[in-house]
Amino acid sequence: MKQFRAVLALFVILVFSGVVFAGSAGDDALQKLMDGNKRYVSGSLVKKDLGDTKRKELAKGQKPFAIVVTCSDSRVPPELLFDQGLGDIFIIRVAGNVVDQIALGSIEYGAEHLNAPLLFILGHSKCGAVTATIDAKGEPEGNIGAIVKKIMPAAEKAKKKGGTKDEVLETAIKENVKNVYKDVMKSKIISHLVQEDELKIVAGEYNITTGKIEMIELPKAAAGKKGH
């Protein structure tokens, strides 16, 4: 009983001293992003501070509240989709929103050094990289092959599931996002932060026609002991 009272007292002290738990910080960050997407869809964007004062403030350092991994596609600019401003989100963009060692290093930097409490893996509809992988015949030229190789497991799984061409593409897009999550969780730094409840990882798909972002349920197998 004494131990319980001690824990309870510590909890009260932390709450009233203004300490924010990382789990709640991740939830709050996700809410900010999704609220921003709602504004984007409705066309009710908030006015951004892009002036000299803001730039000088950010020159002293950055503290983004979220990390976003997404595609290089010109139709998928995260700052606009989530209606955020300068210094708000730390972004990693590559065709097909896949990750390699360099991308993982960037994610680790955002999570461990910049202390962003949320990682959002964002795929999108009509993804050209995923489409090209589904349609691939033979070895692709140049370094594009590295991207195709990353996406191919998702494309093959989608083909096995079957359906119309559009349905196969949609399945592959979602499977690719899940595979990216699995790759991210191979990072010892990221998996540790997740297990310690210091980083929340979520995923979604942006619809380039409607502008809306729908959440994608991530596999539990790769999700750390606290169920992220």
Image: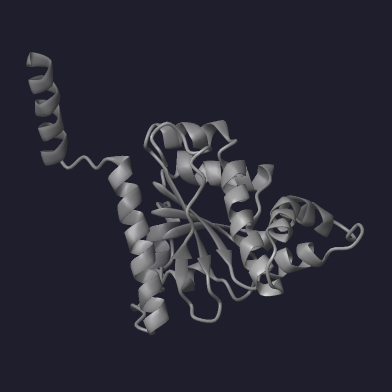
**What is the x, y in percent for residue 131?**
73, 68
Q: Quadrant of the C terminus?
A: top left
Front position in the image: 205 or 66: 205
| Side of 153 where 33 appears, left or right | left
| Side of 137 where 203 appears, left or right | left
Q: Quadrant of residue 172?
A: bottom right
Front position in the image: 47 or 43: 43
Q: Is residue 176 visible?
A: yes
**What is the x, y in percent for residue 147?**
76, 55
**What is the x, y in percent for residue 224?**
46, 34
Residue extending furthest toward the top: 2
Residue located at (78% from left, 56% from top): 148
* Vertical arrangement, residue 188 with respect to residue 53, above or below: above
* Coloration mode: one colour
| Side of 110 where 183 appears, left or right | right
Q: Is residue 53 visible?
A: no
Residue located at (56% from left, 77% from top): 208
Q: How many marks?
A: 0
Front position in the image: 199 or 217: 217
Q: Quadrant of residue 58?
A: bottom left
Q: Quadrant of residue 1?
A: top left
Residue extending furthest toward the bottom: 43
Residue located at (15% from left, 32% from top): 11
**What is the x, y in percent for residue 170?**
62, 67
